[in-house]
Image (cartoon, rainbow, N blue to C red):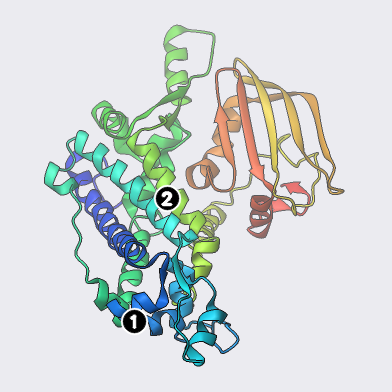
């Protein structure tokens, strides 16, 4: 790790990236709001009295009302929901020199919903950072400037704003940001593995700092018997830490996941209208994690887990899960649930005799990089649950952690 993760002063710098993202979000959000305020529900002929919107609404639209690929009108329609209520009607009226009374709409698209969601999340994160003394009041304030008509009239200006937005999103992802990667890798991790990866966290004051600022805390402590001092040391090693719900750390992780999902889905496809080479940021992180795990020859623990006995096709979007009962330091039984290769839902329970601590050791490298993406680990006092959507199983099989029927 190339930064002093145990120093509070180091984390102040991190939130400048968050603030830059907040500004980029606000600029797009405010532009869309002004567009909606000025244009939504207004007849085209009335809009033209204010400014010539014809190129934005009709630039690159065929006579039959079809939007040409990467045309200006398609960009505004797909990204900003700015379009005629009936584009063919508007074209006909303009062609026949009739009063173009067709109304214009400004709808909330998936892209705008994504921008607003990110904006809301970063506002919350900046407020929490302020409360923790990481940034000042004025640093938490977000003010943006933009020229509404300049953006509409200059396609280059529009692409600069959108390009900046993509860059700011990438800047705070674990793919590119060491501080974000640090936060991402701490969740659901044992103290033993956490301090092996980040030795400075062995110092109590460093761990306490993470607890105070990011809400990292113990969510599981194994029950053991034996010599009190030996038990205390062993329990400490296998305590599992996680970010508490609503904490700064949890909100950061949810921010990363929201961005990854958007760039694995419709938002990325929409942005490809302007930037054909925009990458799948989620797949990109998978590949980075996969290579890191290949380098240490990691595989999912070879025990009774999801898919080991329960075969499935990997084509459904339903969750596959295994829930183990914990007794002391053993996993004693497991309930499986999922879909078979024939598409039929099935579930069954089976007794087992699996050492819990060994399982946690073997699982730790995967938890370190992929918990929350490839699979989800939930652990409580008496239960341990592993879940994976079958789409993740396909991805994992591609990277060599599954065979075509389940976990390797």
Quarter holding residue 306? top right
Verify CB contact (< 8 Å) between mark 1 and mark 2. no
Q: Pinpoint residue 232: horizontal percent, then vertical percent.
A: 43, 14
Q: Around disc 2, counting alpha carbons within 10 Å, would you say few (fewer than 14), some (14 to 19), or many (20 or more)?
A: many
Relative depth, front residue between 318 and 314:
318
User: On the rendered structure, is 174 left or right of 407?
Assistant: left
User: On the rendered structure, is 43 left or right of 210?
Assistant: right
SS for dot 1: helix
Q: Residue shown at 51%/92% (left/top)?
A: 96
Q: Residue shown at 44%/56% (left/top)?
A: 114
Q: Residue shown at 85%/42% (left/top)?
A: 344
SS for dot 2: helix
Give the vertical position of 277 relative to 325 (above or below): below
Residue 275: in sight, yes or no? no
Q: Which residue is mark 2?
A: 256
Count of all numbered marks drawn on residues in the image:
2
In this view, the residue farthest toward the right is: 342
Q: Pinpoint residue 88: horizontal percent, then vertical percent.
A: 57, 81
Q: Residue shown at 24%/49% (left/top)?
A: 15
Q: Which residue is mark 1?
A: 155
Residue 92: in sight, yes or no? yes
Spatial CA distance of label 1 from label 2 is 29 Å
Q: Going from the N terminus, do you reach mark 1 or mark 2 first?
A: 1
User: On the rendered structure, is 53 left or right of 63?
Assistant: left
Relative depth, front residue between 82 and 306:
82
Q: Around disc 1, counting alpha carbons within 10 Å, would you say few (fewer than 14), some (14 to 19), or many (20 or more)?
A: few
User: On the rendered structure, is 150 left or right of 357?
Assistant: left
């Amino acid at each position: 790790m190339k930064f002093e993760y145990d120093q509070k002063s180091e984390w102040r710098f991190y939130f400048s990236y968050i603030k830059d993202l907040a500004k980029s979000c606000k600029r797009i959000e405010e532009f869309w709001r002004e567009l909606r305020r000025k244009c939504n529900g207004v007849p085209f002929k009335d809009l033209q009295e204010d400014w010539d919107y014809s190129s934005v609404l009709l630039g690159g639209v065929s006579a039959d009302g079809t939007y040409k690929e990467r045309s200006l009108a398609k960009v505004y329609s797909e990204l900003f929901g700015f379009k005629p209520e009936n584009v063919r009607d508007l074209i006909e009226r303009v062609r026949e020199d009739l009063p173009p009374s067709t109304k214009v709409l400004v709808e909330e698209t998936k892209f705008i919903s994504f921008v607003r969601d990110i904006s809301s999340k970063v506002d919350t994160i900046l407020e929490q950072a302020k409360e923790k003394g990481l940034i000042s009041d004025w640093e938490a304030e977000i003010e943006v400037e933009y020229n509404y008509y300049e953006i509409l009239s200059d396609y280059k200006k529009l692409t600069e704003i959108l390009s900046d937005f993509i860059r700011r999103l990438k800047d705070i992802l674990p793919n590119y940001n060491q501080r974000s990667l640090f936060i991402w890798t701490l969740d659901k991790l044992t103290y033993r593995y956490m301090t092996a990866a980040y030795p400075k966290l062995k110092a109590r004051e460093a761990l306490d700092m993470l607890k105070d600022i990011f809400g990292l805390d113990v969510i599981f402590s194994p029950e053991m018997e034996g010599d009190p001092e030996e038990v205390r040391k062993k329990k400490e090693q296998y305590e599992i830490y996680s970010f508490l719900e609503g904490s700064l750390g949890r909100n950061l992780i949810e921010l990363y996941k929201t961005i990854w999902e958007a760039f694995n889905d419709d938002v990325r496809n929409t942005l490809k209208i302007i930037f054909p080479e925009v990458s799948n940021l989620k797949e990109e992180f998978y590949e980075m994690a996969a290579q890191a795990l290949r380098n240490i020859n990691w595989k999912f623990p070879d025990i009774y887990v999801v898919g080991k006995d329960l075969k499935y096709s990997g084509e459904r979007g339903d969750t596959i899960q295994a829930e183990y009962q914990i007794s002391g330091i053993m996993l004693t039984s497991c309930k499986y649930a999922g879909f078979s290769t024939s598409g039929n839902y099935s579930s069954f329970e089976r007794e087992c005799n699996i050492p819990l601590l060994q399982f946690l050791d073997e699982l730790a490298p995967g938890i370190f990089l992929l918990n929350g993406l490839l699979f989800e680990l939930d652990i409580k006092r008496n239960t341990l649950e592993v879940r994976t959507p079958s789409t993740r199983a396909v991805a994992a099989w591609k990277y060599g952690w599954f065979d075509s029927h389940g976990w390797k």
